[in-house]
Amino acid sequence: MDSPSERVLDLARKRPATLGPARLICIDGPSGSGKTTLALSLVGPGVRVVHMDHLYDGWGGLPTVDSQLASLLVPLASRSAGTYRRYDWDAGAYAETVVVPPTPLLVVEGVGSYSPAFDELVTVLVWVEAPASERLGRALARDGAAYEPELRQWAIDEQEHFAHSGARERADLVVRA
C-alpha cells in the first residue's frame, strides 16, 4: 500500500492547479497528530513548506490567522510572491516578514491551515488525526511540560476552530497517525 505522503502527492498531481499555476496542499488537524511529520515527508524539488506555528500571534493567535494566510496565498494565486510575518515564540512578538516566491507545490501545515475563506485555492486538504492522549503526549514532548496549561487551552481553541472551519468534513484525505 502507498504511504500517506505518496497518496497525498499522487492526489495533488492528478488535480488541476489552484494556486495560480501551482498546487496547494493544506495539512490540518489537532496539535500533536503528526501534521509536521507528514509535511516534511513531502519535501522535494519544487516543494515549499510553511508551518502555521510561524503565523500565529502566540497562543491566542488561531482566531486571527486568516489575515496571515491572506497575505501568503492571495498574491501567490496571482503569480506574485506571498508574505507572512514570522512569530518569534521566544520574544513573544512578530519578527521579520518572510517572502514566499511562487513554487510549483506549496504545503501549508498546522492547525488552521485550511480556512473556508481560501477554499478555492486548495488543491488537496489532508486531515491528520491521532488519539487525544497520544497527541497531548507528543505536544508535551515537543513543547515541554511547562506549557501544559497552554496546550490544554489550545486544544479547546482548536476544537472550536474546527467546528467552524469544517476541515475534517471537507478533507480529501484523512490520515490516522
Image (cartoon, rainbow, N blue to C red):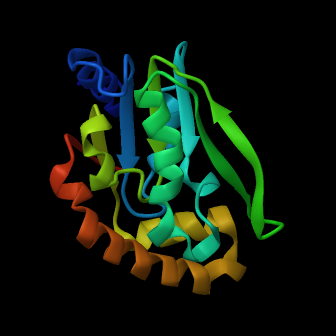
Residue found 37% across the figure and 34% down from its top:
25
Percent position (x, y) of residue 45? 55, 12
Percent position (x, y) of residue 146? 71, 81
Q: Which of 116 and 52 is in front in this view?
A: 116
Residue 38 seen by the camera: no
Choose top left, top right, bottom left or bottom right for residue 87: bottom right
In the image, is residue 95 above or below residue 150?
A: above
Residue found 59% across the figure and 87% down from its top:
149
Percent position (x, y) of residue 55? 59, 55
In the image, is residue 76 above or below residue 130?
A: above
Residue found 29% across the figure and 20% down from its top:
17
In the image, is residue 173 above or below residue 161?
A: above
Residue found 42% across the figure and 78% down from its top:
157
Extreme residue in the top direction: 45
Choose top left, top right, bottom left or bottom right for residue 151: bottom right
Quick check: 13 left or right of 40?
A: left
